[in-house]
Image (spheres, coloured by chain):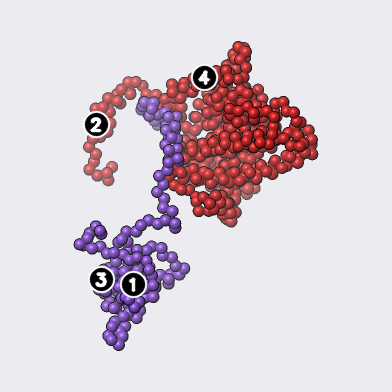
């Protein structure tokens, strides 16, 4: 026996194809003449980033232009992705400074522990996401690259000010 | 063409030949550019309807997007299926492409222009069999799609081709039948005469509103546009008849679709909106002049543009029909209804003739009132949602009552307590 489809006897307003078509056309025309566009025209305009956005790193410098880092070794220790390479050095006065400081941004998971743990507030995550390089090596940021970048840095979550105001 | 003081250009054979060659070249250029711009317009309209911007990166406001698309298609690799019929595979897009364009040749797109060698009619070929020619060429267009489906040696393509042939043959009949009232009014199949009849007797959209609607629906089906684009139904047939096509061959099918749209829009403007006639004025119908030609060209372009917009508007509004709905709409609704309409119009015209009413305001008024009555009967009184839905089976009153009482009682139809988790069932 063939399968039969039963359709309930609904009121005309609900089943008329012509009426449904006309109301659909009216709806699309309304959008056509009065569009509420939400597209961001990306390269020209950008969305504002959150203050706590965690992007590629920056190393802050002191007044004479040298990195604030004292090569204490906390950040490579805390880094869960093991992406920070630090070789400490020491000058005649006994001031420690990094001989080599490299961050592999490909390994980095942008957790922000390095910024949180840093006693000198030297290493920071940046509010920045436009990263493009021609080689994979370009994503291993050395000390020079980390200090020369200028994009704004991430503000860590402050327990005393949870809403970030 | 009315009483013209100047002789037609066809009396001078050399001038006629040169004029025709120029017309063909100019027309071909303008037509292809228009088709290219239509692809952009389609994407823009779809974007606006969906609250997007559409292509706006290539050139000012995206105007160069069609050129970029064309360049990309030229650069792409051309593939042809190994087990397919290579000759027909290459021939199919050419057929689809050229038939789409040939039909336009008989449509007069502006008032005749005066030249030093006589009055030049602004249709590529002012054929005496005008409308029959377009019908004939339009039915050739199905070969392009069907051959594409068959020569691809691909089941999806074949199904698309089969669907297209069934669909286009069905709707061609309805299309031909819906134009017969127009020919009855004009008494001629030359498109120029049909325009002149509308100039004196009022536009056919008022005289023959119902025929206009049936022609509009059939034209949508003939050009395979949504809601009738079953030959390329993406959700079922990958891409239908052009699944195996790539590069410029695919592009030719794409161009053919838009060329068909353009031709159908031009035809609708000519048959039902008075062609190049400018409404509410009489001066454009007298002595030919260059200014008049330009203005009537604008008038024709606006009317055609309206239909092109309607095509896009409807495409981005309505979903695709089911195949049985498509067939039932064509054979069980459009065909009998347009046959009945022919009888109605022929009878009315005979009665009007016997009463001595000539073409003019009174005749248009009577026909318009008649059309309004037919439309109200069709879409308000008879339309119970069954014009399009063949799966509807009329339920007996007793069964309906039983089901309704079950519904009201609540628990019999819809189980009130669902199982705790949906995993078990």
Residue B71 visible somewhere in the drawing:
yes
Left or right: B113 as drawn, with respect to B53: right
Residue farthest left in this picture:
A160
Q: Which residue is mark 4?
A: B369
Label 1 SS: strand
The first of marks 1 and 3 along the sequence is: 1
- Which chain is depicted red? B
Rendered position, B289 above or below A47:
above
Labels 1 and 2 share a subunit: no
The first of marks 4 and 2 along the sequence is: 4
Labels 4 and 2 share a subunit: yes
Labels 3 and 2 share a subunit: no
Q: Residues within 10 Å of mark 1 (few under 14, many from 20)?
A: many
Give me the chain letter of mark 1.
A
Q: Which mark is residue B411?
A: 2
Label 3 SS: helix
Q: Residues within 10 Å of mark 3 (few under 14, many from 20)?
A: some
Q: Which mark is residue A59?
A: 1
The quarter of the image holding the C terminus of chain A is bottom left
Left or right: A9 as drawn, with respect to B347: left
């Amino acid at each position: 026996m063939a399968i039969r489809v039963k359709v309930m006897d609904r009121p005309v307003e609900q089943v008329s194809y012509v009426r449904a078509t006309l109301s659909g056309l009216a709806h699309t025309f309304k959008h056509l003449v009065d569009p509420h566009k939400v597209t961001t025209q990306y390269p020209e305009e950008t969305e504002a980033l959150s203050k706590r956005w965690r992007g590629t790193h920056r190393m802050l410098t002191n007044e004479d232009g040298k990195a604030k880092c004292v090569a204490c070794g906390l950040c490579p220790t805390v880094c869960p992705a093991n992406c920070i390479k630090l070789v400490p050095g020491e000058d005649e006065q006994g001031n420690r400074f990094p001989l080599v400081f490299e961050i592999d941004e490909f390994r980095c998971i942008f957790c922000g522990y390095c910024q949180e743990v840093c006693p000198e507030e030297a290493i920071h995550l940046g509010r920045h996401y436009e990263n493009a390089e021609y080689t994979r090596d370009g994503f291993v940021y050395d000390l020079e690259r980390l200090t020369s970048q200028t994009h704004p840095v991430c503000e860590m979550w402050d327990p005393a000010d949870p809403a970030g105001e | 063409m009315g009483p013209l003081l100047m002789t037609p250009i066809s009396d001078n054979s050399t001038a006629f030949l040169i004029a025709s060659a120029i017309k063909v070249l100019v027309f071909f250029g303008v037509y292809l550019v228009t088709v290219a711009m239509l692809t952009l317009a389609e994407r823009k309209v779809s974007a606006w309807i969906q609250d997007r911007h559409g292509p706006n990166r290539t050139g000012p406001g995206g105007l160069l997007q069609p050129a970029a698309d064309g360049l990309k298609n030229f650069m792409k690799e051309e593939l042809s299926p190994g087990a397919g019929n290579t000759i027909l595979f290459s021939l199919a897009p050419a057929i689809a492409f050229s038939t789409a364009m040939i039909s336009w040749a008989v449509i007069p797109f502006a008032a005749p222009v005066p030249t030093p060698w006589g009055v030049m009619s602004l249709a590529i070929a002012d054929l005496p069999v005008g409308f029959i020619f377009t019908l004939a060429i339009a039915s050739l267009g199905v070969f392009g799609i069907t051959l594409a489906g068959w020569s691809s040696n691909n089941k999806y393509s074949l199904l698309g081709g089969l669907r297209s042939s069934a669909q286009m043959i069905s709707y061609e009949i309805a299309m031909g039948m819906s134009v017969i009232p127009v020919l009855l009014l004009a008494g001629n199949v030359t498109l120029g005469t049909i325009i002149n009849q509308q100039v004196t007797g009022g536009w056919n959209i008022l005289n023959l509103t119902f025929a206009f609607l049936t022609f509009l629906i059939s034209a949508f089906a003939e050009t395979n546009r949504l809601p009738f684009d079953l030959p390329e139904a993406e959700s079922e047939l990958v891409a239908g008849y052009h699944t195996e096509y790539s590069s410029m061959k695919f592009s030719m099918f794409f161009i053919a679709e838009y060329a068909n749209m353009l031709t159908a829009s031009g035809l609708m403007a000519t048959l039902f909106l008075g062609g190049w006639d400018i409404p509410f004025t009489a001066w454009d119908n007298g002595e030919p002049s260059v200014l008049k030609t330009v203005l009537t060209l604008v008038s024709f372009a606006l009317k055609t543009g309206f239909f092109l917009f309607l095509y896009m508007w409807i495409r981005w509004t309505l979903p695709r029909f089911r195949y049985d709905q498509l067939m039932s709409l064509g054979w069980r609704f459009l065909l009998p209804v347009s046959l009945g309409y022919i009888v109605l119009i022929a009878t009315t015209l005979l009665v009007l003739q016997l009463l001595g009413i000539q073409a003019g305001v009174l005749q248009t008024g009577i026909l318009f009132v008649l059309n309004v009555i037919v439309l109200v009967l069709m879409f308000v009184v008879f339309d119970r949602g069954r014009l399009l839905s063949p799966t509807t089976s009329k339920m007996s009153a007793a069964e309906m009552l039983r089901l309704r009482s079950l519904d009201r009682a609540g628990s019999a139809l819809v189980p009130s307590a669902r199982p705790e988790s949906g995993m078990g069932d």
